Image (tube, helix red, strand yellow):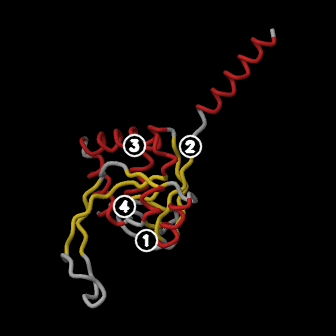
Amino acid sequence: MKKKLLIGLIATLSWGVSNAETVLNVGLIDQDRSPYFYRSGDNGQIRGAYIDILNIIGEKLDVSFTYKQLPQARIRLYMKNGQLDLEPGIAQDWRLEPGEIKATVYTDTFYRSKEVIVYNPKQFKRTKPVAIYNLRFRLAKKYQYLLPEFNRQIKLMTESGEITRIMNKHTE
C-alpha cells in the first residue's frame, strides 16, 4: 500500500514539474530599435519583430518571455552572471569576452540584417560602412536543452517565409 502511494505521489509530482511552463527573462536595450522592438504608443507595451518571433516559438515550446529594457552593458553583464536568460538579435562576433562565450549559447541565424555603421575613424579601426550580420538568439547556457527546438522552429519559420512577413509587418 505504501509503495503504491509513493509511486502515485512521485508520478503526480513529476507530471506537475514536466508540464510547468518555462519563463525566460529577455534583455532588450533601453532604447526602441524598430522594427525589432519598440514601445507601442497606445499602451506602452513592447512590440516588434523579435517579440512576435519569440511568441510563436514560445507557443510551440511552452515557454513564455518577460521583457526587461536595460542599458546594453547591463544586459551583457546579466547574461554573463545568469540574471537574464535570452538576448535577441545578436551576432556571435559581438559577444567575445571570455565570460560571455562561456555562459551562453546561440541559436541558428533567424535573420540577416544589413546594418549601416556610423563611427569616428579616429576611435575605431576602419570597417565597411555597410555590414551584414547573422542575427541569432543568445541563450543562457542553462537553457541549452531548448536549442534543438528553437532551431527547428527558426528553420520552419524561415522556410515558410514567416520571419520575412513578420519583419515586413513591422517596417510598414
Under circle 1, the secondary element is loop
Q: Distance between the residues labelled 2 and 4?
A: 22 Å
Residue 62: horizontal and vertical position, in percent?
51, 38
Q: Distance between the residues labelled 2 and 3?
A: 14 Å
Q: What residue type is labelled 3?
A: Phe
Mark sitting on residue 90: 4
Q: Name the residue under label 3.
A: 150
Question: Which mark lies nearer to you, 1 or 2?
Answer: 2
Q: Do the residues labelled 2 and 3 touch (CB within 8 Å)?
A: no
Nearer the observer, 60 or 166: 60
Pointer 1 local density, CA inside 10 Å: few below 14, some 14–19, many at least 20: some
Name which of mark 4 and mark 3 comes first in the sequence.
4
Residue 151: horizontal and vertical position, in percent?
35, 42
Question: Which mark lies nearer to you, 4 or 1?
Answer: 4
Give the residue at x 35% y 66%: 94
Vertical side of 167 occupied by 153: above or below: above
Q: In this view, does 159 lie to the left or right of 18?
A: left
Q: Distance between the residues labelled 1 and 3?
A: 25 Å
Residue 104: horizontal and vertical position, in percent?
45, 54
Q: What residue type is labelled 1?
A: Asp
Q: Mark 2 points at which residue?
A: 22
| Image quarter (top left, top right, bottom left or bottom right) of the N terminus | top right
